Amino acid sequence: MTSVSIEIEAASSFPADKVFNVFSKFDDIATKANPEVFKSIETVEGTGGVGTKKIFTFGDAVPFTSGKYKVDAVDAANFSYTYSFYEGDNLMGILDSITHHVKIVPAEGGSIFKQTVTYNCKGSDKPSEEILKAEKEIYEKTFKAMEAYGVAHPESF
């Protein structure tokens, strides 16, 4: 099986626990903070922990309509979580899954948001460089939109 990964890294002036708290409420915030990318997020099984399954319906800024994912790991003490898309047109017909590992690292003056996205291919076909670049830009913009939402609504975090 072939795989390809992209790395997203963004600095935040907020401490790791606050950034992790914002992202732990992704389902509620993403559709408000970045509606052109996230039209809806629906939990279909579970309560948010490991094994929870969700359906994303993507907005007009994304060339896909939907994707189903499951939560693989949550480690609140270390500000990390992992989830995998395993079904949907976001797999482009060439992927078995897309695994996302998110880690918020404490840093002087705030924190660093790190996300590794691994595209697990069915065969030798891989997403094009254009798709990978576009996806990286979407993830970076989503981080900034989520962070801005947290700043605008500090009482929630």
Image (tube, rainbow, N blue to C red):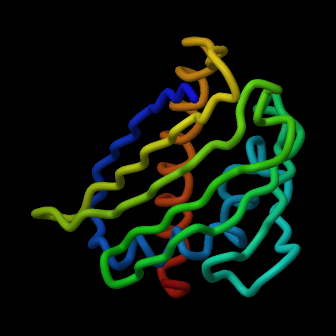
Image quadrant in which you'd find residue 109: bottom left
Quadrant where the N terminus lies?
top right
Name the foreground residue: 132 vs 142.
132
Q: Residue at x 41, y 78 (%)?
A: 75
Position of residue 105 relative to residue 49, above or below, is: above
Q: Is residue 9 left or right of residue 64?
A: left
Q: Residue at x 21, y 65 (%)?
A: 110
Q: Quadrant of residue 94?
A: top right
Q: Residue at x 61, y 12 (%)?
A: 128
Question: Between 6 and 155, which is closer to the camera in this rendering?
Answer: 6
Q: Is residue 127 left or right of residue 141?
A: right
Tell me: residue 26, above or below residue 75.
above
Vertical order, 147 against 7 (above or below): below
Q: Is residue 147 above or below residue 50?
A: above
Q: In the current view of this chain or complex, which residue is farthest to the left?
A: 108
Name the residue nearer the viewer: 152 or 114: 114
Query: x%, y% of residue 89?
Result: 86, 35
Q: Residue at x 89, y 39 (%)?
A: 65
Q: Position of residue 152 (x, y in %)?
A: 53, 69
| Residue 124, position as x, y percentages in the image | 62, 15
> Residue 140, how many percent across, how many down?
48, 40
Q: How many marks on residues?
A: 0
